[in-house]
């Protein structure tokens, strides 16, 4: 993940230092959640808030991260996974769709398809979405995702395969 | 496969920074700086068990020896009250900080039948009103707390007591909203608060959820189609939120057995604990002080299988009585484990197990409420 923000050397409890860090990190963290949670502003706000509060909690406990931006991304990723996990618990079990998928209808979109893609990602079942996000947005390997989720690499590949199918279906169902 | 699936390209292009509203930025920054400030000012780690203020308006007009005598009696009353946790005539700002003090009488009865259980907030769309958690029981108890919110006092669990008439009036108020005719799953459009209303009568239970916060919705959310609230529903939602947050403003005096907030004293605590990624329960117990591990192991009642992975509050839980909880607190204190008391309860160890080092752990104490479903 390319970072376009500068990192402060060491984040302490100095309010001014924290303010600088906040200004740098906020758009990244908010964008991170917004695009992974269906473009929902309330959810992105809630998770952004939880992430920064957790970071402050860590700072108050004496943690002094050398690289604050990757550090807070780590917290954000954990919050996101927690969010997905809870969504998965709330989801009704869904049978795999039987309808044939018209692969030709799905094509790489220009920027105009961005909102459509965000909506489609939100419609993917949470367990599959977790794998898609970690692999294709956050850049982890299937083995690393398996470690994170307590699943075998083969199980992650299966999730990715079903996730890609679900995403395509959802994408084609979303009104352009 | 000859090429990369186009889904990969589409998803990879999604990531980019985004700017939240200026109001959200400022509100959150203010809150974070406020959170940082106490640490920067080296606030004592452990707060007093009760935070009280004197009854406002009490004027001292006595003089001489009589005044000294009265002062001495007052001091004695305060000391005895603090020790025995009977200082309930003082107005309590925050409820219990940390665990229930020795001698505090638990709220009675231990179990209660829910009439209403609601948790509404956070939204920052209009303003950060924090979150109001409130439970009304058939026996008249109203147990509530306010979490966060600009301009609101943050409290632990507080208790008031309604008469049967008061319970009936609250019930009627909820019914009059028209929101609880059947289960609803509402979006937050119309700026309604996120959360839920769980309403019970003798023969039915209706759950209304709003928002998309899965923390709140996963456990209680009805699996009904999500809809946008009508203007009428949004108004009713806001009105109910306002009414529940200030019952004293609209309930008559006859509705109250005791309208004054007192700290809710639980009958016990659910103590949950977890460690770093991949650390199982038996390994975790090795990192805890042995007496703590023994105590927790004996009372372990994890409600469902948990497994340890990042991003989750990976934990196991034990049900402890107040005495057992205080014993565990003493064990952890004596072992030098870092702990923080607050209106939310008591927490030891790392803030977030997802960030824990291999031998680090977290132990959190949460007060049990009278309804079984929270336990």
Image (tube, rainbow, N blue to C red):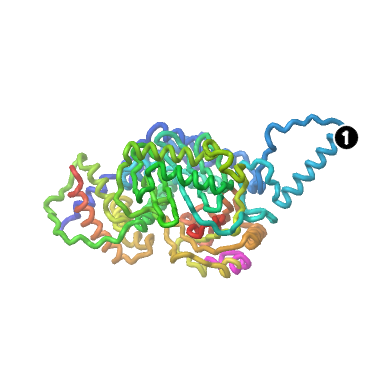
Q: Position of residue A164 (x, y in %)?
A: 23, 56
Nearer to us in this view, A132 or B113: B113
Q: Position of residue B254 (x, y in %)?
A: 58, 41
**Which residue reaches farthest right?**
B65
Residue for point 52% across, 53% down: B138
Up/down of B72 relative to B104, above or below: above
Nearer to us in this view, B210 or B317: B210
Residue for point 26% across, 59% down: A160
- The reply, left or right, for residue B91 in relation to residue B285 is right
Residue for point 84% across, 30% down: B63
Mark 1 burial class by Cα count in 10 Å: few <14, some 14-19, many 20+: few
Nearer to us in this view, A23 or B116: B116
Q: Quadrant of residue B18?
A: top left
Magenta stretch, residue numbers: B284-294
Nearer to us in this view, B80 or B168: B168
Location of the N terminus of chain B (image quadrant): bottom left
- The reply, left or right, for residue A3 in relation to residue B115 is left
Up/down of B108 relative to B247, above or below: below
Q: How many marks are shown on the rendered structure? A: 1
Residue for point 54% across, 40% down: B35
Please indicate, yes or no, whether residue A61 appears anywhere in the rendered image: no
Q: Position of residue B72 (x, y in %)?
A: 82, 41
Residue indicated by mark 1: B65
Please indicate, yes or no, whether residue B255 appears anywhere in the rendered image: yes
Label 1 chain ID? B
Residue B285: in magenta span: yes
Q: Position of residue B244 (x, y in %)?
A: 49, 41
Magenta residues: mostly which secondary structure? helix
Q: Which structural element holds mark 1?
A: helix
Residue A19: in magenta span: no
């Amino acid at each position: 993940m390319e970072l376009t923000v500068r990192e402060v050397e060491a984040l302490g409890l100095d309010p001014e230092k924290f303010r600088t860090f906040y200004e740098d990190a906020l758009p990244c963290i908010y964008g991170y959640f917004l695009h992974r949670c269906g473009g929902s502003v309330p959810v992105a706000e809630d998770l952004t808030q939880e992430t920064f509060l957790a970071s402050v909690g860590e700072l108050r406990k004496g943690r002094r991260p050398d690289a604050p931006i990757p550090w807070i991304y780590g917290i954000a990723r954990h919050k996101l996974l927690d969010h997905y996990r809870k969504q998965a618990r709330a989801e009704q079990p869904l049978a795999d769709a039987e309808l044939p998928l018209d692969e030709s209808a799905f094509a790489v979109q220009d920027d105009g398809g961005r909102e459509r893609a965000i909506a489609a990602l939100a419609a993917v079942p949470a367990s599959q979405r977790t794998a898609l996000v970690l692999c294709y947005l956050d850049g982890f390997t299937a083995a690393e995702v398996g470690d994170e989720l307590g699943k075998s690499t083969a199980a992650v590949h299966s999730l990715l395969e079903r996730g890609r199918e679900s995403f395509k279906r959802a994408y084609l169902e979303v009104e352009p | 496969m000859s090429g990369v699936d186009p889904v990969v390209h589409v998803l990879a292009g999604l990531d980019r920074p985004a700017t939240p509203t200026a109001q959200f930025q400022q509100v959150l920054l203010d809150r974070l700086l406020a959170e940082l400030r106490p640490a920067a000012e080296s606030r004592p780690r452990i707060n007093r068990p009760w935070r009280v203020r004197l009854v406002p308006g009490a004027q001292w007009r006595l003089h001489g020896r009589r005044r000294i005598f009265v002062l001495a009696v007052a001091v004695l009353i305060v000391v005895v009250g603090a020790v025995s946790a009977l200082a309930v005539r003082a107005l309590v700002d925050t409820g219990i900080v940390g665990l229930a003090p020795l001698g505090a009488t638990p709220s009675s009865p231990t179990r209660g039948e829910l009439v209403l259980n609601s948790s509404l907030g956070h939204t920052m769309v209009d303003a950060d009103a924090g979150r109001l958690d409130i439970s009304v029981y058939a026996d008249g108890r109203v147990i509530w707390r306010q979490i966060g919110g600009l301009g609101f006092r943050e409290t632990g669990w507080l208790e008031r007591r309604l008469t049967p008439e008061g319970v009936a009036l609250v019930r009627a108020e909820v019914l009059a909203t028209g929101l609880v005719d059947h289960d609803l799953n509402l979006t937050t459009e119309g700026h309604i608060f996120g959360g839920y209303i769980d309403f019970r009568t003798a023969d039915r239970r209706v759950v209304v959820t709003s928002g998309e916060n899965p923390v709140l919705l996963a456990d209680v959310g009805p699996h009904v189609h999500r809809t946008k609230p009508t203007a009428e529903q949004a108004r009713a939602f806001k009105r109910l939120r306002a009414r529940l947050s200030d019952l004293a403003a609209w309930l008559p005096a006859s509705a109250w057995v005791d309208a004054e907030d007192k700290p809710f004293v639980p009958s016990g605590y659910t103590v949950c604990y977890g460690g770093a990624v991949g650390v199982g329960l038996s390994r975790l117990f090795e990192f805890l002080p042995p007496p703590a591990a023994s105590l927790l192991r004996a009372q372990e009642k994890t409600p469902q299988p948990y497994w340890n992975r990042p991003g989750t509050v990976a934990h196991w839980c034990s049900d402890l009585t107040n005495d057992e909880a205080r014993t565990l607190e003493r064990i952890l204190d004596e072992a030098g484990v870092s702990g923080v008391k607050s209106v939310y309860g008591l927490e030891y160890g790392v803030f977030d197990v997802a960030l824990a080092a291999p031998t680090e752990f977290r132990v959190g104490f949460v007060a049990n409420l009278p309804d079984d479903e929270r336990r």
